[in-house]
Image (cartoon, rainbow, N blue to C red):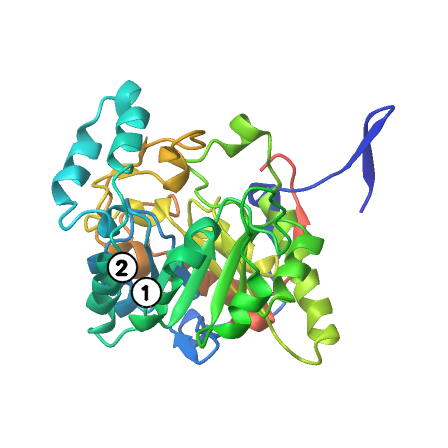
Amino acid sequence: MAQVEIGLGKNGRRAYELDEIGIVPARRTRDPEEVSITWQIDAYRFDTPLVVSPMDSVASPETVVAVGRQGGLGVLDLEGLWTRYEDPTPLLQEIRELDEEAATARLQEIYAAPIQEELIGRRIEEIRSTGLVTAARLSPQRTAQYHRAVVDAGVDIFVIRGTTVSAEHVSGRAEPLNLKQFIHDLDVPVVVGGCATYTAALHLMRTGAAGVLVGFGGGSGHTTRSVLGVAVPMASSIGDVAAARRDYLDESGGRYVHVIADGGMSGSGDIAKALACGSDAVMVGSPLARATEAPGGGFHWGSEAHHSELPRGHRVEVGTIGSLESILHGPASTSDGSMNLMGALRRTMATSGYSDLKEFQRVEVVVNPHG
C-alpha cells in the first residue's frame, strides 16, 4: 500500500475507516430469506455473527441471555458492576442520573469496589443455567488472578480483552501473562484482543487463540485517540488482520482463527462493511445500548471510562429506540440503520449476490474518502 509523506523525516501508510468504503453489488442478486448469516467458532454455532461487547451499559446477565436467545453471543464483563456488587441496580440508576461533569470521577469511585471472586462463579452460573453458550471477559491484567474461578464455573468461551493486547508484553514490575502457555493449559476456546496490525494479530494467532479481536473497542465512548494518540482506522485494520488469518492458516497447516471486529460500528451499514473487509463476526456495544432492556438505560460507557489513573472514555447518552429484538431483527421504525441490524445484513449480502458469510468476505469494495 502506498506510503504518504507526512514530513521529510516521516512517512505513513494511508488507511481507511469503515465510512470511507462502500460495498459493490454484483451482477447476481439473491432472496434475503435464502441468505445464511450463521457463524460458528470452535464447537459453538450461532444464528448471527454478532457478539455483545462486555460493557456494563449493555451486558448484564439478563441481557446476555436475551441476546443468546436472539441468536447472538453475549459476553459478561467479570470486572464490572456485576462482580463487584450483589445488586448493582441502584448504582446503574445513579450512573444514568449523574451530571456530565461529575460522571468520570463518580464512575471511578463506583468501580473502585473490589471484585468478589464468589460473584464471578455466580454470574457465570446464572447464564449457564439457561443452557446458552456462556462467554465472559477478563482483562489481561486480571486473567492470571481470576481465570481459575472462571473456568471452574463452566464458561464456554473465555474472552481476554483490553484496549490493546500483545503476545509479548514486557514488564519489569510483574511477571506478564504468558498467553501461549495460558491458552495451551485451558480446556476452553479463548478470544483475545484488541489488536490493529498484521504483525500483532499473527503473534496472537500463534498463541493458540480461537479468535482475535480487531480494534480498540468502545468506539462511541472511548477517547483513546485524544488521550493516547493511538488510532488505526477500522477498515484497514480488519483487512490487515484478515491477511494475517490467511497466512497463519497456511503456516499452521489449516488452523482457522476467527477475526472479530470490535468497536466503531454504530449501525447496520458499518456491520456489513466490517464483514466485507474480512471479519467473521462483529462485537458491538452502542447499537445495543439503545435497547429498552439495556442496563445503561440510554447511556453507554466502557471499562476505559473509569480507569483509576488514566480514563480513556466517557459516559455518552445514546438514547433508547426500541426492544433488543427490534434492534437485532426488526421490524425497524427508523431509516438510519439503527434497527433490524441482522435483516439489513441479509439484504446487503443478497444485493451483493452472496449466500453465506465466508463468501461475502470476497465482495468487492470501493474507497469513498468523503463517506
Farthest right residue?
Answer: 8
Mark 2 packing: few (<14 Cα in 10 Å), some, or many (20+)? many
Mark 1 packing: few (<14 Cα in 10 Å), some, or many (20+)? some
Residue at the spot x=23%, y=21% of the render? 99
Residue at the spot x=69%, y=73% of the render? 249
Q: Quadrant of the C terminus?
A: top right
Which quadrant would residue 232 be assigned to in this image?
top right
Q: Nearer the viewer, residue 348 or 173?
A: 173
Q: Nearer the viewer, residue 104 or 257?
A: 104
Residue beneath label 2, please? Answer: 120
Q: Is residue 72 visible?
A: no
Q: Is residue 222 above or below residue 134?
A: above
Residue 146, percent across and down?
Answer: 37, 58
Residue 45, percent across and down?
Answer: 41, 77
Residue 71, percent across and down?
Answer: 33, 69
**Label whose residue precedes the other's in the sequence (2 or 1):** 2
Counting every numbered tag in the picture gives 2
Using the image, tell me which numbered label, if any, was put on residue 60. none
Local secondary structure at mark 1:
helix
- Three-letter amino acid code at disc 1? Ala
Residue beneath label 1, please? Answer: 149
Q: Is residue 8 above or below residue 38?
A: above
Local secondary structure at mark 2:
helix
Farthest top residue?
Answer: 101
Residue 217, percent across and down?
Answer: 47, 46
Q: Is residue 6 above or below residue 330?
A: above
Residue at the spot x=22%, y=59% of the render? 118
- Three-letter amino acid code at disc 2? Ile
Whether pointer 2 and pointer 1 mark residues with C-beta atoms closer than 8 Å, the reply is yes
Which quadrant would residue 199 be assigned to in this image?
bottom right
Q: Is residue 162 visible?
A: yes
Residue at the spot x=59%, y=66% of the render? 180
